[in-house]
Amino acid sequence: MKREELNSGANSQYKTTKRKVNKRHGKAYKVLKFLMMFMLSVFLIIVISGSILVTALTIYILNFADTTSTINLDNVEVNFTTRFLAENPEYDKEDETSDQYVLYYSMSGNGEKRTWVDIENIPKHVRDAFVSTEDERFYSHDGVDFKRTLAAFVNVFIPIYGENQGGSTITQQTIKNITGDDAQMGGEGYARKIREIFRSINLERTATKDDILEAYLNIVPLGNNVCGVQAAANYYFSKDVADLSVKEAASLAAITRSPTIYNPLYDYDMNVGRADDFILKNMLDYGAISTNEYNDALAEELVVTGDPNFTTAVENTDNKYECVGVSSYYVDAAINNVLDILQETEGIDYETAEDKLLAGGYTVYTNVDLNMQSEVENKFLDPTNFAYYTSDDDTLKSAFIAMDYSGNVRAVVGDRGEKTVSRSLSYATMARRSPGSSIKPIASYAPALDKDLITYSTLFKDDPIEIINDEGKKEEWPVNYSEDGYSSNWSHKNYFTYQMLYKSLNTAPAQLVKKLTPTYCFNFLQDTMHLTSLVANENGKTDDAYSPMTVGEFTYGVYLDELVGAYQVFGNQGKWYKPSFVSKIVDKLGNVIYDNQYVSEQAIDSSTGYVMNRMLQTVITNSEGTGRYAKLQNVDLVGKTGTSDKWQNLTFVSCTPEYVSGVWIGYELLSEIDRNQYKNIGAIWKNIFGNIADAGTAKEFAMPDTVKELKYCKSTGLIAGSRCYDTDTGYYKDSNIPETCSGNHY
């Protein structure tokens, strides 16, 4: 090959190689350029996305800051409990530190047992047991302990603590318990935590540490549906929180770790072990207890009583009237009163009303007189107040109720003996029993007197009326009964109206019912006296008949509270107020949903009410009066006894210038009462209520201007004339004053 050719080939190969190298360099550049652009784009995307994320997160957090700052500890208690308040008997309106109302009872939904107790009534060692364990820097942080939160996070991966370190402060736990906001996992869990943090920070700005700790200690779950240290002290140790020992306080604090695992009723050893090894040690390290106190607590044997029925009543150190556990008969009646109001005002059914009451956080102002209620309850625990002799039949039932002349029920007891179950049967408000002759003043005498058909001294002959019996035959009816409940013949003698009343003869009421008609008397009882248990026509039975209207033998009977409520008209110048156990109801937002306006009804004329009052006085003051055993020394008393057929129910209803009250005795299943043992129903009333009634400040009933106190002739019942020498004093309505006697007495 020629040199030239060789050189030419070589040059050609070189050029080709150079071109190939340059081509490879171009691809690398393009790749590098692409990578640089890609990285730049990713960086810009990250920056922009991060900016958007940060902005969004900032807005998100700020939004939480705006929407989660409304927790108000003033409403914590009512958010979880419905409270029944009572007037403080020791209230002094001149003393600004005196509380007008005290807590009487509290109730919560979901079966939870709670009782609120103020922070000053929780011993320091109880507070320290929880603080040293749950949040040792509680008094120094601003709602969130970030050191504790970080430690809790680290401890998940590096367990440097003896047990898992909780990150939530007492403030945060309080927020969670108040709101029920308890999401744990995923996005909502993080959102909840953010809400909790901001709520805690804001709460610390508006509430004191003591306020926050008080709320926490009253709502913290402590197992067995028990919430709060007061309820827990009662439930586990049958004592008030103020009486807890250091060991018992540590036991309660130990439960917070896991209310199931560390429950002293379920696993005693686990609870005591945590109390000794962790809680007490923390309290010692925290400086809450001394070494001696620590050693004493370790040596103390923990005695867990465990009251599964939550029946033990305890006293608050400052409020002896606070009730824990079983509700009183008064509370039961107040609950039913509230349920009726909720149904009426909100148009809901019973079940819905009950749910709202349990979970609604209402504040209910009751009308109870705490001193009176306590005294009457104690009287019902003493069998000697019922038995005429020393022996006693503990199966005998009884009930009592007292109210003022605005219808405010001041005391009520629904049965004898100790009350062991909440919302149990009350014979005062829930049982219908025959009132016997105690129905006569409101069914026959009062309506007849109101219509001016009779006067104080109208003469009645003790004769029966003629009726058609159930067999369609004519019958002379009714028979009279002796004071001991045995039938007696008619005397055919003349008696004045008031004599018929104090002797409790059946003939005069029968004559009046015949004149008025049973239907009129029925409507009077139902519409004017507001007895709701009457039967118009039920399975062929009706109370629109002679026997119910004359002697009180109703189909089902009447309620004691309604019967006593009807007697208001005899001590209140004819006015009737609806009996009420509550005066006001406030919802959890502070809105008044019920406020008793105390609107009265003029059931009978005021003059009728007073003349009836004077006639009923003779039931007490006359030596033959059936209520003579109830007579008081200092205060005017009027009333009427009642005995049902076959001596199965005894009733006494009475009025003093301040109170109208009634007592009933009988058996759960209708049965004859021992005549010798329990015949003095007036004496039973006096044993129960006499001291209270006789201590009243008002001594006499006021006589209206429309009534005249006049002498009447004891031969004719007319106003005594100049020739009438045998006279007595009577009381007469201006509208119906009898004629003056001529003196012709034969």
Image (cartoon, rainbow, N blue to C red):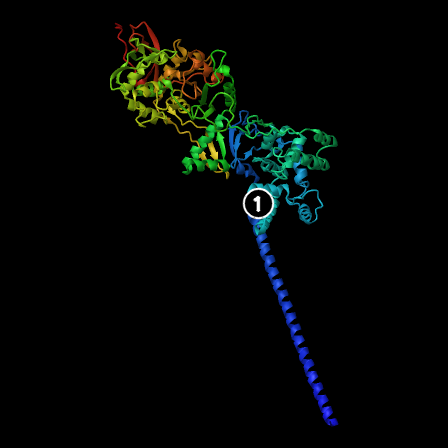
In the image, residue 117 sits, relative to residue 62, either above or below, namely above
Q: Quadrant of the N terminus?
A: bottom right
Q: For residue 135, what is the image quadrant?
A: top right
Most foreground residue, 205 or 103? 103
Q: For residue 729, what is the image quadrant?
A: top left
- Residue 131 rendering spot, x and y as whole percentages: 66, 38
Most foreground residue, 726 or 350? 350
What SS does tag 1 mark? loop
Most foreground residue, 354 or 652? 354
In the image, residue 33 sits, relative to residue 636, either above or below, namely below
Task: Quickly name the residue at label 1.
Answer: 182
Residue drawn at point x = 40 percent, y = 26 percent? 577
- Residue 546 rendering spot, x and y as whole percentages: 30, 20
> Label 1: few (<14), some or many (≥20) within 10 Å?
some
Q: For residue 685, what is the image quadrant?
A: top left
Q: Residue furthest left?
A: 473
> Would you say 249 lies left or right of 414 here?
right
- Residue 436 rendering spot, x and y as whole percentages: 37, 18
Q: Quadrant of the C terminus?
A: top left
Most foreground residue, 191 or 221? 221
Q: Say whether residue 661 is visible.
A: no
Amino acid bearing label 1: Asp
- Residue 737 rendering spot, x and y as whole percentages: 30, 15
Q: Residue furthest front?
A: 1
In the image, residue 263 sits, relative to residue 547, either above or below, namely below
Q: Say whether residue 353 is visible.
A: yes
